[in-house]
Amino acid sequence: GNWMEYTPDKLKDLTSNHTIIGTEELKMVAVELLQGLITDLEGKLGLAPGQHPVNEQSIGSEQNSKQKTKKAKKSKSTTTVEPAAADAIPDICKLEFKVGRITKVWEHEAADKLYCEEIDCGESGGPREIASGLRGHYSLDEMLNKRVLVVSNLKPKKLVGFKSHGMVLCAAATQADGSERVEFVEPPEDAPLGEIVTFEGLPPPAPVSGAQVDKKKIFQACADGMRTNDEGVGTWNDHVFMTSAGPCKAKTCKGCPMR
């Protein structure tokens, strides 16, 4: 029958008079009453038959939201900044210029224009051996103990049988008779050996390998921009060659190409 027929008073009468209603019938009445109550509540709450009163879709959305938040946090924690592309770095910053001092020098036995030098660049492996075509510009005594700038990330090359591990940076002035006056671009006296030159207004140096310098002709690409200014200060496209003790300079070659 209709569960609404079983009012509290009627149920009281039924349960108090066991001769009128048996135990099994009482159980059936209770089940029918309970099911009726559930059906009534579902109607009032707008639920489909058997649907849980808590919104399952809402739970799913909340769980998805939490998972997304976790993923976002994880993604944020593992994000890394990509290094700047090599092409974005100025070519001059791909070269390495080190402060050095010539500790030993001798004439190349088979090349009348070359000196062979040992240059202390503050490196753990000891001094570098470098060959320079400077015999027409400096005497042996003038070369010894000279403070210089060494281009230190060039690919080693043999010069008339002598393996040269870099080159010294010089400035060259063309004289009235067409000859050249060549002199070192020198770091300040107080610049420590091994210090790497920086460039005013440019990013810190990011030297590439000697193989890359050679393959991409980086030194040649920089050559046109390397000049001393009117005060003899070494520059690349007007960016000064700097050390912690000040700029690097040629003594007399002003407004001249550097090489």
Image (spheres, helix red, strand yellow):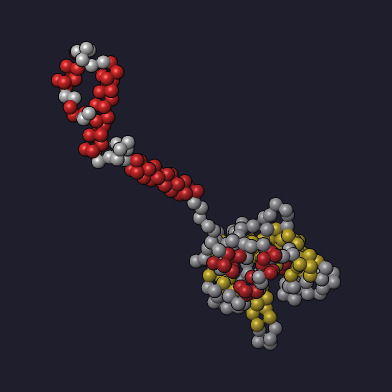
Left or right side of 143 for 4 = left
Residue 119: x and y in percent read: 72, 61
Residue most toward the left? 9
Percent position of residue 82, x then y: 53, 57
**Residue at coordinates 78% horizontally, 74% vertically from top-left?**
113
Name the quadrant containing residue 146: bottom right
Q: Which residue is at a point 80% across and 66% down the rendered structure image?
A: 162
> Residue 173 versus residue 90: which sits nearer the camera?
90
Q: Depth check: give the residue in front, 123 or 27.
A: 27
Q: Position of residue 175 (x, y in %)?
A: 66, 84
Give the x, y percent position of residue 19.
22, 12
Farthest bottom residue? 177
Task: Identify the image quadrant of residue 6.
Answer: top left
Q: Which residue lies furthest to the right in this view?
A: 110
Residue at 69% in and 64% down: 210
Residue 168 appears in view: no
Location of residue 221 (image quadrant): bottom right
Judge left or right: residue 49 versus residue 232: left
Which is nearer the eye, 114 or 166? 166
Which residue shows up at 54% across the image and 58% down it? 83
Q: How many marks are shown on the rendered structure?
A: 0
Q: Is residue 14 visible?
A: yes
Foreground residue, 166 or 8? Answer: 8
| Quadrant assignment for the N terminus | top left
Q: Quadrant of the C terminus?
A: bottom right
